[in-house]
Each structure stands twice: as structure tokens, then as C-alpha cells.
Amino acid sequence: MRTGSESNMAAERSRGFTLIELLVSMVIVMIILAGLYSNVLMQSRVQASQASTVDAVEDLRIASQIMGSQLRLATSICWDSGNSRLVYQPLGAPVTLTAANCGTLDSSWGAFQFSSGTTATGGKLCWDVPNKWSTSGVGCQEVLRGLNQATGFSASPTSNSNLAAMRTLTLVSQYKSVDRTNRDLQISFDVLPRNN
């Protein structure tokens, strides 16, 4: 036979949790889950930002190698500011590139041209391959996209007084940062045309 205190203890053990205890437990679990979700979300944003940065760096590196290899084999280079393009005369081109005819594009010359694009896609850089190497007639081939719309491609000096001078080319690409905004990533390299 149970005494009064023993039956009270047995009743307390079988009673379970009160509604307030359950609510407090659920709030604590929800706070922990919210913290874990926030941590996972931040990690995925960091990984996406790192992947975007790596892609932008690799694209800039490849574009600079293509441009550099072509321009180092050129006999002269001019900056056509009216069309945002760098025009070059490859070795063996039958028509000579001069400061006066830089605004036109002879079929035997090559050019790297920037177009601003849209906010969503960014600017792009295309390569007008000289006819001597391009038999397909494709025209301007896209080399790089996702460039900064305003400052995606520039050359210095912009003066065409010396077409055999060294030029510094700058490409400015964009990547998505952790806070999902577009950030600039830039590469600059020098090119010196080959002298005849």
C-alpha cells in the first residue's frame, strides 16, 4: 500500500510536460535551428561568391592571354575611341594601319572591341579576327562577357601618335560578392607590338 507522499511522487512522474514547458522547448529548438540555417545560408553565399570570383579571374586570365599573344605579333596598334576598340595590324597585312585610318577596319586587320551590354549580362569583349586567319567569316567572336558596363575595357595611352608604342590594356570584370552585389575585378597587362 502506498503512502500519500509516494502516490504524489508517482503522479508527478506520470504527469508529463506542461504546455508552457513545451512552448519554451519549442522556442529554444527554433532558435537553434534558425542559427544553423543562417550559418548554412552564409556558407552557401560565401561558396557562390568564391566560385564567381574564381570564374572571373580565370576568364580575365584567358582573355588577356588571347589578346596579348595576338597583339605582340602585331606591327602596330591603335585605339579607336569612337568604337571602343583596339585595332591592330598583324604581320604581313597588305594595308598599313595609320592613325588616320584607325577608325575604319580593314579586313586584313584585327580588333578587340568592347560593347557595354545590359545590366544583367554586363559588357562583352569580342575579337574581330583578321581575314588571313578567319576563313569562316564569323566576324566578331566573343572572348569575354560579364565586364563592367562603363569601364570594361580600356587602353593607355589613348593617343595614336606612336602606333609602335607600348600600351597598357585593362579589363574590368564583375563577380557577385557575398552580399550579392556586383564587384569589380581588374587585370592590366602591357603589350608592345613587334617592330618590322
Image: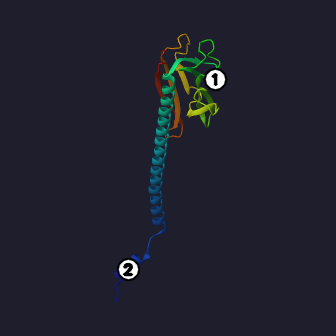
Closer mark to the observer between disc 1 and disc 2: 1
Quadrant of residue 120 within the rendered picture: top right
Q: Nearer the viewer, residue 31 or 114?
A: 114
Residue 56: x and y, percent? Answer: 50, 36
Residue 109: x and y, percent? Answer: 59, 22
Q: Nearer the viewer, residue 20 or 169?
A: 169
Q: Which numbered disc covers residue 10?
A: 2
Give, as a three-letter code, the residue at label 1.
Ser
Residue 28: x and y, percent? Answer: 44, 59
* Quadrant of image for the N terminus: bottom left
- Earlier in the chain: of badge 1 and badge 2, it is 2
Query: Which type of secondary structure does the marked residue at label 1 adopt?
Result: loop
Q: How is the image coloured?
A: rainbow
Residue 116: x and y, percent? Answer: 62, 29
Q: Where does label 1 land, which residue?
A: 107
Q: Which numbered disc covers residue 147?
A: none
The vertical placement of 94 against 148, above or below, is: above
